[in-house]
Amino acid sequence: MNPAPIIHTSIEESQAEMQVIRRDIHAHPELSFEEFRTSALVAEKLQEWGITILQGLAGTGVVGVIRRGQSHRAIGLRADMDALPMQEVNEFAHTSQHPGKMHSCGHDGHTAMLLSAAHYLQKFGHFDGTVYLIFQPAEEGGGGAEVMISQGLFEKCPVDAVFGMHNWPGIPVGHFALKSGAMMASANEFALKISGKGAHAAQPQMGIDPIMVAVHIAQAWQTIVSRQINPLASAVLSITQIHAGSATNVIADEAIMVGTVRTFDGAVLDEIEKRMQSMARHTAEAYGASVDFRFTRNYPALINHEKETQLATEVLQKMVGEAQVNTKVEASMGAEDFAFMLQAKPGCYVFIGNGDGDHRSLGHGLGPCNLHNPSYDFNDALLPLGASYWVNLAESFLS
């Protein structure tokens, strides 16, 4: 039998209020760097509770500051606020009121959990030092964490360690997952323009067909991971779009091919980029075409630090029991811009179980409750659990 999780009574009593806040944010989703309403709501609540705030980092970022005692030690707790450019198919009361925008990744819940923890820490927090409550914009491809850092986040908020948390569908409610080392992959994009020579489709010998060049390059690229990278080194190279031509009887003069590369290892990523460029150039030359290859490194791999991961593990095991804390979770090939914070400061990122979707009330879509799915909804049962983790972690770190 699983033990009952240790949740602070005050946090449990405020769940209904936090659920209202969470669902209000869900109903009013805002995209990266446009979180003006959400940011204002967060700032208003923090100030209402007497918490000092910093505003303006990355435009809509908000940081709450709670100090106790004389220690100079400090911890950062981070939640993301942005939504995705997706159409929600749910029809329950708190469904998105903005067409084409949706909280399909649970950032509404992450914001509410950190607000709940902020409320408790301000009223009852027992620690010596400073807690920085980081409400970050633009996680979904905008690199809001990197922007906040570049604009002085850790100079204004000199934390000794920083921690993040994300809900994870498929992990049961009441369970957590984490591990030291690589937790999530890097996210990188490529774009290849192949320049050939247009011709009539009935006279292919008069042209240089960029589509056939693209086909050969695509096939060659798929051997990089399968034949040129160590099988023990995880990597994914996905070609997601090929664009060429505009008529059935015309051989196009150019083709575009784009996609993503994900790895956990910087050296592996370097090798993949080098081989992609070399293969594309030499294959195109063999057919008389030319290429323009662009490779963009968006988010680095998210690497948890050993000491901070051990602390987070101990806090979680005391909360919910060892059996409900998976310390050997399989790393995800998804990406997270919290990785930038972990490059700048030691820390740890954990998954909190969001269940399998049974929590969704009548009116949810027919799809699964997966992240980035139009039928997704955050599980409000997580609110007191996630908030209690933040409180216990902060008090343990600053004990």
Image (tube, helix red, strand yellow):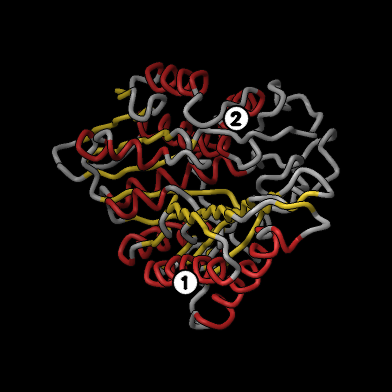
> Residue 360, position in %: x, y?
77, 40
* In this view, 75 is above or below 42: below
Local SS, label 1 = helix
Give the quarter of the figure containing the N terminus: bottom right
Q: What's the amino acid at mark 2?
A: Arg
Local SS, label 2 = helix
Residue with the mark numbered 1: 275
> Residue 204, position in %: x, y?
75, 61
Left or right for 142, reference 124: right
Residue with the mark numbered 2: 22
Q: Residue at x 54, y 46 (%)?
A: 385
| Foreground: disc 2 or disc 1 | 1
Disc ID at residue 10:
none
Circle 2 Cα neighbour tier, 10 Å, few/some/many (<14 / 14–19 / ≥20):
many
> Residue 91, position in %: x, y?
81, 29
Q: CA distance from mark 2 to mark 1?
A: 46 Å
Looking at the image, which is closer to me, 128 or 34? 34
Left or right for 93, reference 235: right
What is the tally of numbered marks visible in this picture? 2
Q: Residue at x 48, y 50 (%)?
A: 336
